[in-house]
Image (tube, rainbow, N blue to C red):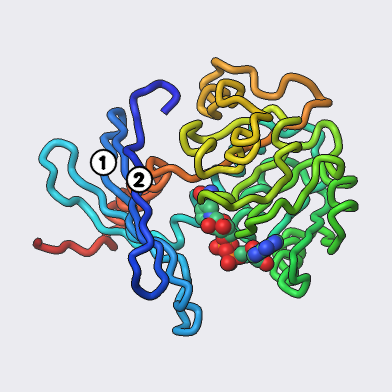
Amino acid sequence: MARKSAYNFPVIREAIGHADALYGFKSGFDRESLALGLKSGGFWPGNIDKGLTNHQSTVFLFDADSGRCRAAVGGNLLTALRTAAASAVSIKYLARPDARVLGMIGAGHQSTFQLKAALDQRPFEKVIGWNIEPAALERLASVAKERGLPFESVDLDQLGRQADVIITITSSFEPILKAAQVRPGTHLACMGTDTKGKQEVEAELVAAATVFTDEIAQSITIGEAQHAVGRGLLSADGIVEIGAVINRTDPGRRSDDEITLFDGTGVGLQDLAVASAVVDLAVARGIAIDVDL
Ligand code: NAD
């Protein structure tokens, strides 16, 4: 994306007027890997009562030379993996090298994937967590235990005081974490806000941070930065796409004291990249199912 050889097409997301569902698709094309396709799905709030995950998605890949369908891949697990990978990449490139305490806000479906991927990025010595319903933190505690790390349930003041890296992964529509609660030098990966109106951290905190994102167009419309930009506290020009840091055209973190914030909104190219890798693996292992359309 940062080299402009891969791009996302405009996102479609519609309330379909049935089953309270939000349905849409994210699509794009990568001219280098030739990944072409879309992820289609959305949010069905009644699914939980049917024993199904509320978020449902399927990725369709197409042959870039012929337009023929190459593969259909279940997207639920892949979404969790690619979202956790995006957050982990932000920690790899933006967190201070001496980060040792990881703070988690949110303990839903995505949170354990987030925690596992983050723990590989620094030699973390402790995990702390906050969730609106504290009982759900048990699932994060058990991941920490598997990795031999202590886990502590904390309030938001303690979380901000202790954590070097904070991941937010909730479906909140109100700011949870405030600017005054976060220490200089902290890296935040804000991963839950992917829709207009959602919000996990105070706009003042976004404004006080150096802001990075996967895609600026999404960050300012459906991402965490939408509120700071909407209130005139942050300009879109001040946001850096993380691809520039990875490709070394932007230095990333400028000092040990600065707060870095990654606004992970989730782009279609992530879905295509991870689905393509999985299809290649399945073909190589002989477990892909061949279907004549
Ligand atoms: P989930 O429903 O399993 O968990 C939701 C979490 O948010 C729980 O911890 C819940 O306690 C918490 N929460 C709900 N309302 C809250 C509130 N008002 N205040 C504080 N906490 C609240 O959802 P999930 O699958 O874990 O997804 C979490 C979020 O991540 C969702 O908003 C989802 O849309 C988003 N998401 C983003 C991406 C991306 O690419 N950025 C990808 C997948 C999911």
**Residue at the far top in the pictured view:** 249
Q: What residue does disc 2 label?
A: 272
- Quarter of the image for the C terminus: give it: bottom left
Position of residue 43 measured from the top left corner of the image (x, y, whole percent): 44, 65
Task: Name the residue rendered at 77%, 51% in the picture.
Answer: 103
Q: What residue does disc 1 label?
A: 36
Question: Who comes first in sequence, dot 2 or dot 1?
Answer: 1
Instruction: Please name the amino acid that badge 1 sits on.
Output: Leu
Task: Name the residue rendered at 35%, 69% in the picture.
Answer: 17
What's the distance in space between the residues labelled 2 and 1, CA to CA? 7 Å
Mark 1 lies on a secondary structure that is strand
- The quadrant of the picture showing ligand 1 is bottom right
Q: Quadrant of residue 105?
A: bottom right
Mark 1, Cα crowd under 10 Å, few <14 / some 14-19 / many 20+, is many
Position of residue 46 measured from the top left corner of the image (x, y, whole percent): 46, 78
35 is higher (above) or lower (below) than 77: above
Mark 2 lies on a secondary structure that is helix
Instruction: Please name the amino acid that badge 2 sits on.
Output: Leu
Image-based side of 4 in relation to 134, left or right? left
The answer to whether the residues at label 2 and label 1 have Cβ atoms under 8 Å apart is yes
Q: How many labels does the image show?
A: 2
**Residue at the far front in the pictured view:** 231
Position of residue 288 measured from the top left corner of the image (x, y, whole percent): 26, 61
**Label at residue 46:** none
- Quarter of the image for the N terminus: give it: top left
232 is higher (above) or lower (below) than 273: above
Closest to the observer: 128 or 226?
226
- Say whether residue 92 is visible: no
Mark 2, Cα crowd under 10 Å, few <14 / some 14-19 / many 20+, is many
Task: Name the residue rendered at 84%, 54% in the picture.
Answer: 156
